[in-house]
Image: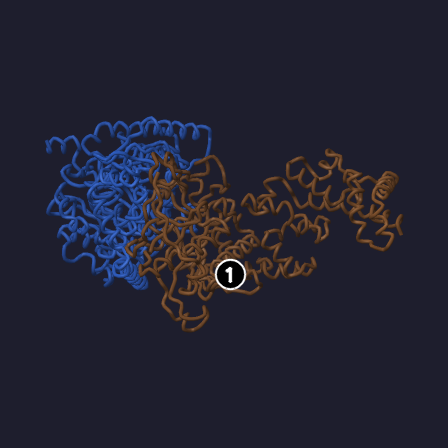
Amino acid sequence: MTTVATDAVMDYDEAMTKFDPVMGLEVHVELHTATKMFCGCPTEFGAEPNSQVCPVCLGLPGALPVVNEKAVESAIRIGLALNCEIAEWCRFARKNYFYPDMPKNFQTSQYDEPIAFEGHLDVELEDGSVYRVEIERAHMEEDTGKSLHIGGATGRIHGADHSLVDYNRAGIPLIEIVTKPMVGAGERAPEVAKAYVSALRDLLRALDVSDVKMEQGSMRCDANVSLRPRVGEPLDEAQLAVPLGTRTETKNVNSLRSVERAVRYEISRHAAILDGGGSILQETRHWHEDTGITTSGRVKSDAEDYRYFPEPDLVPVAPTRETVETLRGTLPEPPGLRRKRLQSDWGYSDLEMRDVVNAGAVELIEETVAAGASAGAAKKWWLGEPSRRANAEGQDIVTYAAGLGLTPAHVAELDGMVAAGRLNDSMARQVLDGVLAGEGTPTAVADARGLELVQDDGALEAAVDKVIEANPDVAAKIRDGKVAAAGALIGQVMKEMKGQADAGKARELILAKLQ
Amino acid sequence: MTDLPTDLTRASAADLAGALASGTISSVEVTQAHLDRIAAVDGQVHSYLHVDGAGALAQARAVDERRRAGETLGALAGVPIAVKDVMTTKGLPTTCGSKILEGWIPPYDATVVSKLREAGLPILGKTNMDEFAMGSSTEHSAYGPSHNPWDLDRIPGGSGGGSSSVLASFQAPLATGTDTGGSIRQPAAVTATVGTKPTYGGVSRYGLVALASSLDQAGPCGRTVLDTALLHAVMGGHDPMDSTSIDAPVPPVVEAARAASVKGMRIGVVKELGGEGYQPGVRARFDESVALLEELGAQVVEVSCPNFEYALATYYLILPSEASSNLAKFDAMRYGMRVLPEGVDAPSAEQVMAATRDAGFGPEVKRRIILGTYALSSGYYDAYYGSAQKVRALIAQDFDEAYAQVDVLVSPTAPTTAFKLGDKLEDPMAMYLNDIATIPANLAGVPGMSIPSGLADEDGLPAGIQILAPAMKDERLYSVGAALEAALVDRWGGPILDRAPELGAAAAKGA
């Protein structure tokens, strides 16, 4: 077991008084094309190791790549959605380095001729302000296989007895999206980083080009961070003119929350080093989700040389302008605009909409409304227990709900039962618990648990009479016009009815009897 | 119908195909005759790295049955063939002449091999070659050199010296080759056989273990121009598995070989290929061939291709660069040889890779990997690989300008006849110079062919003439080649290979 020395960090607020952070984010997205980038093998996640391979993606002698046209289309659509230029002519290149999980010992990628370049993505922050992320490029490449290191304490290669390699992932199409240096975010840098990755994820999901599951690695983020001395406000010309500091690249940050935390941590760590008169080593860093720190990876010196050269086994990719325009016509409504439209349709306040967006529940609510629920009810149910539990599990709500089999149709069904007067609120909560526990559909749960409002007015009236008789003081107050006091009686009536009564009806009866 | 010789191994593929089609002979008979010949002479020539007698006979039987059943078969159905060991063959070893692939049995066939199987050509075995096709002599084969049937002390050319010597020693009527800088044409020249490097993209590269992807081209080898054309037609054509394959029909090579005419053609003699460094006897046979073409009705002019001077230097930057990357996959992780480093406890993957590559690659391969790695390094890329690509474009431009004036170009195929085994092994530059006339075609992607031009006076060994045509005009090679071949054979009074020594006698001489 190796012990990792914890680096010194500076308090974040203090760091911000002394330094100006600059970030660069590289996001790798696995496309969900049916087949791999250069061969016909399937791309499904989670298959038996090395069952989705062929001579091409295993890099067997003699095998040759053929470009997946669908992947090129997806790359162009991503580029267009990011407001990029689309290359009229570009090539693949070989990135040469030796690693056991890379079958050819070179990665077929793009180097100085990316398919898409010079774009931007406007990102809305928590307070509603907009930060424009400039996109340097989006290029196509193939994924590597996956190494599994056995016998070590950390799961890393260091200390392992042996390693196993699964080449199912080798050759899956990847798009790498690289930002220009993100400047001027100041203390909001970590928030901007998270908001960017989140907006990008929404965009890719809307494009239907990737599963964008960060926890499965279909979307992976590398965060570059550097600091420069603070000489003014983040957007002051003098501040923007200060040369960039040395950066570190924190690899494989794989949740939105981690993106924010990792950037924040690196800022504090850099600040401590620089403030102490030290200098930053240009290196990759490993992010540790559990402890919230980064540790040193490999030193990334300028000597690292991938010997890029144009891939001679492939012909250039040259999409015609007609093709590009046709693909532009297939772009979905931008997530930002779509949200504004939905917010207006649903009648949510800005704050309510932001809660829904932050919970990642826009699509769930949209589907729930489509299934017949009211917008208010859909929000209430999704942002309640399911959202709270998903958070506690550290999962996004879509994944969490899907894992438990809770669907928008269920929620609409539940809402329908309340609207029809079969359930009251607290009963509906119990039913939802049952659905989350895997007991079946809302109707099935309500039936099995015997949850149903008592519709027998006689029983309710008897209960009301009993409670009024037992509480003469409260009854007197109500008679004197203190209607608010009815609440205390309603609670007792509900208790008498074991919760299976309509509270509104109970209130009506009490008031009728005492006024 | 031509009468077949009693010894079936002396017959041309076209004649064998005719006899097979008419039912005079069976594929089993032809195949067995060649297997017998292999057993008798390959001990001296060492053309084959692997002979698959059982497999070849099984394929021969299958073809005979299909024929008996009345199926329509391809033109070469039943004619056996030898396959260069650089092409993957499902179930048959494929070593590329390297130790690093010793014992590897590919799980798939190269497209060319699939086409041979579909066309019903029984595969006799896999032929020797310089390791990963790097060389001009087969001396860089990890399994020992092949010998030239004209003189067993001499090289059969390379890298396809296994295929050329197979043909010249009648161990197969046809063979496949690959040509990256002359590996089909130079071996053909020094053994008095025929070989074509088709237009780049004319024959699929899928399943060819890559040397330099932008230069490699598979092609046919035979003893006559017509045989070579028949094989070309089987091997060629578009392959969706090879992105660089041309989506167009195979040029009408067989028709051209049968027509065998140069009447009215404009033929350019490349000024830069044939001066200093060319053996007088090679030069003399070339000049006679050119005169003969003129007699046959061609118009001959001299053409200058000034940038050909830089072809060799350009080639030796592009080839090693691509090769260094193509050969990176041989890392002991998934297939082939695995060597553990000595004296290292629990070696890392990286250490195993290094030890394996050190033990598994021969010196020429290492030399080129190092050259290529250097040429692609950042800081050197522009000066080396980048400049080489620019010169490559200039060489292609030279061809374009030449083809604006003439229909085909001609030159000697190689500057010399076959040299002695061992003569140039210690001098890579001298070895590289052998390909000086063949390399420009690979750099420009244009097709080229070598046919025998006669025997050099000073050593009595074969010399070759190279014919070059514009891209996708491969048929012109066959028109010119067949016309010249007919005139030369007429002049010689029979095929030149009839003058090659009997192998038993040559062996006795060597002993």
Question: Residue A5's spot in the image, x, y percent?
Answer: 35, 47
Q: How many marks?
A: 1
A116 sits to left or right of B380 = right
**Image position of B230 with respect to A258: above or below:** above
Q: Residue at x 61, y 39 (%)?
A: A404
Question: Residue B287's spot in the image, x, y percent?
Answer: 18, 55
Q: Give the letter of the blue chain.
A: B
A456 sits to left or right of A214 = right
The quadrant the C terminus of chain B occupies is top left
Q: Give the letter of the brown chain.
A: A
Q: Nearer the viewer, residue B435 or A354?
A: A354
Task: Give, as a three-letter code, the residue at label 1.
Answer: Leu
Question: Residue B480's spot in the image, x, y percent?
Answer: 29, 52
**Image position of A415 with respect to A246: above or below:** above
Could you tell me which secondary element the residue under label 1 belongs to? loop
The quadrant the N terminus of chain B occupies is top left
Outermost residue to the front:
A473
Q: Nearer the viewer, residue A346 or A95?
A: A346
**Coloring scheme of the render?**
by chain
A258 sits to left or right of B300 = right
Say if residue B472 shows up in the picture. Answer: no
Chain of the residue displaying label 1: A
Q: Based on the displayed image, in which of its 4 quarters is residue A165 positioned?
A: top left
B55 sits to left or right of B284 = right
Question: Residue A133's spot in the image, x, y percent?
Answer: 48, 63
Say if residue A435 shows up in the picture. Answer: yes
Q: Nearer the viewer, residue B35 or B327?
A: B327
Q: Nearer the viewer, residue B290 or B369?
A: B369
Q: Which residue is mark 1?
A: A82
